[in-house]
Image (spheres, rainbow, N blue to C red):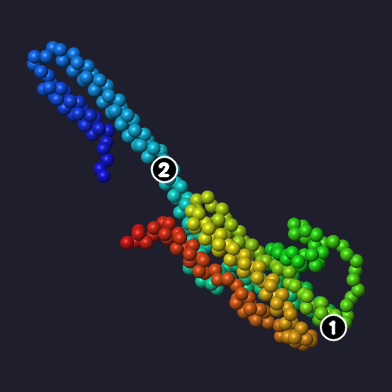
Amino acid sequence: MKKINKTQVIVISVSTIILLLIVFYYNIDSEQNQKKTTFIIGQIKDTFQILFFIIVGILTFLSYLQAKKTLFTPIKTETFKIQIKAFEDILAFFQNKDESDFKEQFDYDFMVFSNAHFLLKDYVELFFKDKITIKDEYINSLKENIAGMVIDKDYMETVNFSTPNYYEKIETPKKEEITSPAIILNKWKSYKYGMVHFSKKYADETEKIKQLIASPLIPDNIKNKIIEFEELVSINFHIIGPVLTKIAQEFPEKFPNETSIQNFQPSGIWNQYNRKSEHLAPKAKEILTEIRTYLKIDDLVK
């Protein structure tokens, strides 16, 4: 619809006034001209006043609309620019990545690999304490890329950690060393890998997700999809513990002596982990689809 500017409003109003004057003029009865003249003049005066206030009201409203457009358009433009930047960050994080890319991005392979070696260390120290020595240099090289750990509640109680906030170990009386193979094996049956280490790379990438979610300019539907993706990332980390706990029960049969320990290969553990882990690529695709829908990309390219 074509917009009416201020000049057109004034022209229309003046034309209306002239038309009313003509109508009133031709309706004056010649015999009662003098009597009606005063009445008509009063009517014209009232009409002028009404039209004046109408015109002023219209002009004021049009001025408000113009001022509103002039004032808020730059703000909307700048907000949209910032929002586009936020979308660019999301696209850079999720676009053109398959499942293996996300596994590498969140460092799952290293975390499974390193935690598997920490598990092996526990096993060797229990079964072959005086026969096999795991080099501290190798374990320390793995720990250099470790940012922290998540401790299972049940495991925390088993090893006498006081609270999940401080992990402050309580001093307990020293236990007698167990040497009986049967007792050692029985103890291993209740073993739980409850202290899962996470890498610096994993911590950095999960922090990036939190920053994307924290943006106030991201629409809720897109933000919710990113939150769902974050939950899958967390699930894939937390299943490392249960997978290693299950695999730990296979160790006595697979590695019954010192020589067999040399056959330890984390690749088998990685395969079992992969079968349990959630797929991240489909959820990433949903996020990208939501962005395309929000920005109406498909309509723009038509």
| Count of marks placed on residues | 2
The location of residue 248, given as percent across then percent down, is 73, 78
| Relative horizontal placement of residue 132, taking residue 100 as reference (left or right) | right
Q: From the top left corner, tell me how far across and down residue 256 is, in percent.
A: 78, 86
Could you say which disc has been placed on residue 74 in the image?
A: 2
Observer able to see residue 139: no
Crowding at mark 2 (Cα within 10 Å: few <14, some 14-19, many 20+): few
Rendered image: mark on residue 182: 1
Which image quadrant is residue 280 in? Answer: bottom right
Q: Amino acid at mark 1?
A: Ala
2 or 1: mark nearer the eye: 1
In the picture, measured across the screen, residue 237 lies left or right of residue 8, that is: right
Q: Secondary structure at mark 2?
A: helix
Residue 80 in view (yes/no): yes
Which mark is on residue 24?
none
Q: Position of residue 100 (x, y in %)?
A: 55, 73
Q: What residue is shown at x 14% (from left), y 25% (from top)?
A: 23
Q: Residue drawn 49% across and 57% down?
A: 221
